[in-house]
Amino acid sequence: MSAKNNDLEEYEVEKVVDHRYRKTAFPDGSHDEYLIKWKGYPSSENTWEPESNLNPGALAEARTLKWTTEQFENTKSDELRKDVLCISACNDCATAADVHNVKKSFKLPDAAGKFGGHGGGACCSSLLSILYADEKVPEEDLSFKEIIWKMRKTLIKDPYRQIPQMSSMNPIDVNTKFDLFPDTATGTKRAVMIGVNYVGK
């Protein structure tokens, strides 16, 4: 399977990773796009491509992925339709207590609760530091994508090896405003942050 870019160079498709429906203004119009993993290139080089850039073999795989995703969304149970969002970090060599002093390293106002200033997790601490800073600037609304990107830059700078990632029970637009409690939420509001500390593998 292959696809062509604007310079008419041909690359081989290793795998169709994901599908999205992109809403764009005239004259392009809204259209399906597919996230492509190119053979011989790392995942960081994956690109979103319209159907017109895919050859018949890659297009068939892409449309199968689209159908599978739509079928799952249309048939999943009510339990799977709840709004559950998870922000985590992926790195097998990291532990959840990789920061010696979270108050000093991330300048958290109430670091680690009763353990004030003791060890903790870099991923959770980076998220909290960004949320505390954002709260001080109410006129600035960060999107989900900006939150994850700021976490990534914070962790790289320090440096820690975790790579922040986000998963959701339902499709979301990552460019929308990040909120622990959406504007549409009613009733009692609760947020849960779970930190897991472990040693070894």
Image (cartoon, helix red, strand yellow):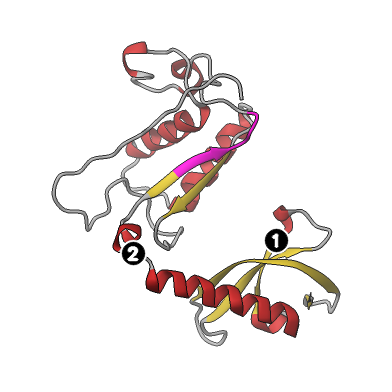
The residue positioned 33% from the left and 49% from the top of the image is 179
Residue 122 place in picture, x, y as percent = 52, 27
- The residue stretch that appears in magenta: 87-93
Q: Quadrant of the N terminus?
A: bottom right
Residue 42 place in picture, x, y as percent = 76, 53
Q: Give the residue number, with chain letter if any, for mark 2.
A: 77
* Residue 50 against residue 172 in the figure, above or below: below
At label 1, the amino acid type is Asn
* Residue 56 against residue 118 in the figure, above or below: below
Q: Give the residue number, with chain letter if any, for mark 1.
A: 46
In terms of sequence position, does the residue under pointer 1 or pointer 2 come before the other? 1
The answer to whether residue 64 is magenta is no
In the rendered image, which quarter is residue 16 located in? bottom right
* Residue 111 against residue 78 in the figure, above or below: above
Residue 97 place in picture, x, y as percent = 51, 21
- Is label 2 in a helix, a strand or a loop? loop
At label 2, the amino acid type is Ser
In the rendered image, which quarter is residue 196 located in? top left
The residue positioned 65% from the left and 81% from the top of the image is 51
Residue 72 place in picture, x, y as percent = 45, 69
Instruction: Say which of 46 and 126 sits in front.
Output: 46
Instruction: Say which of 57 and 54 sits in front.
Output: 57
Question: How many numbered marks appear?
Answer: 2
